[in-house]
Image (cartoon, rainbow, N blue to C red):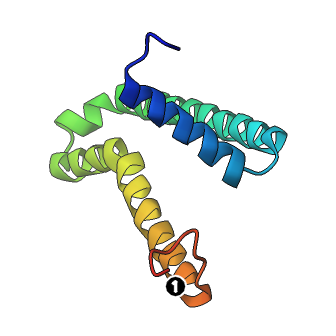
Amino acid sequence: MADLDPNLQKHLEYNCYLQNTYSIDKSKNHILQNEIKSIYNINLALFIIYYLIVIVYIVLDYKNILFGEQIIKHSIFVLFLLTYPFIIFAIQHHIYAIISRTYNYVFQNIYQSKDY
């Protein structure tokens, strides 16, 4: 570690200090990280499956979408289907942040609120 930049060395030492001081059981942290990775992988698989289903729908209904009587309606619907995961993620993220901030403000969780 003698080859490391002194600032980086101090940063690594401080991270070790924080981990040893404030961390709970390391095995619990490891299990939690594995659960988060598996949730991420499942969400990625669902994301891919969703877009495969949307692409199959677009391919099967191609004639109605581009050459049907209600072109605008079908085009807006396809656009909505393509942007749906991103819209839902943003809404979900903001609702969770609002609920989390409210909960932390009401119960004054000093680790989650900045009012301490």
Q: Nearer the viewer, residue 43 or 112?
A: 112
- The crowding category of the residue bearing disc 1, from other C-alpha atoms within 10 Å (few below 14, some 14 to 19, many at least 20), is some
Specify whether residue 18 is in view: yes
Q: Position of residue 93 (x, y in %)?
A: 44, 60
| Residue situated furthest top in the rendering | 3
Q: Amino acid at mark 1?
A: Tyr
Q: Position of residue 47 (x, y in %)?
A: 50, 35
Q: Nearer the viewer, residue 28 or 14?
A: 14
Left or right of 67 in this view: 116 = right
Quadrant in the rendering for residue 115: bottom left
Q: Is residue 113 above or below residue 21?
A: below
Q: Residue at 53% across / 14% down in the picture?
A: 1
Q: Is residue 40 above or below residue 103?
A: above
Check disc 1 and report the residue beneath it.
Answer: 105
Q: Nearer the viewer, residue 35 or 50?
A: 35
Q: Is residue 84 above or below residue 56?
A: below
Q: Position of residue 14 (x, y in %)?
A: 53, 41
Q: Residue at 58% across / 68% down in the picture?
A: 111
| Residue situated furthest bottom in the rendering | 106
Q: Residue at 62% across / 86% down in the picture?
A: 107
Q: Residue at 43% across / 53% down in the picture?
A: 89
Classify mark 1: helix, strand or loop: helix
Specify whether residue 53 is in view: no
